[in-house]
Amino acid sequence: MARQFVGSRGGARPVRKRAGFRGTPRYASVEALRMNEQGRRDDLYSWFFMVVEFTTGALPWPEQRYQRQQQILLGSSPEEYKAILKHIQSLDLIEEPNYNFLFQCLMGCARRNRLPD
């Protein structure tokens, strides 16, 4: 199901204009649903949507229009989730995410809610 990120010469593979959809629509990024090339950013969107669903009990789609989904998605979520989503949204297709930042956000949320390490 996955496409190799690195080509045979060691560099990033060229971006395709159109990529087939792979995955579960419920957790897919907008770019994936549009059948655009996917990268680590899109993996993080899927991960983030699952985390939100696990911690809040639901995702807003398909019941809500796209414009309101982010507001509803983060409405009852911990504050740290806003920082995580902002970081994911700032990434371009081939940019490496700041995994340490994401980890620190989650740890901060856990400490604030007095969850064990």
Image (cartoon, grey):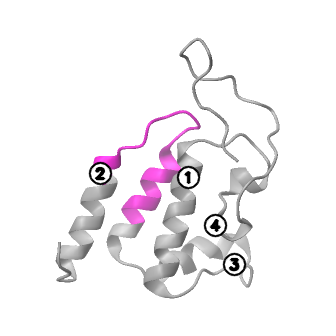
CA neighbours of label 4 inside 10 A, class few (<14), some (14 to 19), many (20+):
many
Q: Amino acid at mark 2?
A: Phe
Mark-to-mark CA distance, 3 and 4: 10 Å
Q: Which numbered disc covers residue 101?
A: 2
Which badge, 2 or 1, comes first in the chain's sequence?
A: 1
User: Please, is residue 79 above or below residue 15 in the view?
Assistant: below
Residue designated by label 4: 27
Closest to the observer, 111 or 66: 111
Residue 83 on the magenta segment: yes
Under mark 3, the amino acid is Trp
The answer to whether residue 109 is left or right of residue 1 is: left
Amino acid carrying label 4: it is Tyr
Q: Which residues are magenta?
A: 82-101
- Residue 53 placement (x, y as % from top left): 52, 79
Q: Quadrant of the C terminus?
A: bottom left
Q: Which mark is residue 61?
A: 3
Q: Nearer the viewer, residue 54 or 31?
A: 54
Q: Secondary structure at mark 1?
A: helix
Instruction: Give the Cα distance between marks 4 and 1.
Output: 9 Å
Identity, as a three-letter code, of the amino acid under mark 1: Asp
Q: Residue at x 53, y 15 (%)?
A: 10
Horizontally, residue 62 falls left or right of residue 89, namely right
Q: Position of residue 56 (x, y in %)?
A: 47, 85
Label 1 belongs to which residue? 43
Residue 117 visible from this viewpoint: yes
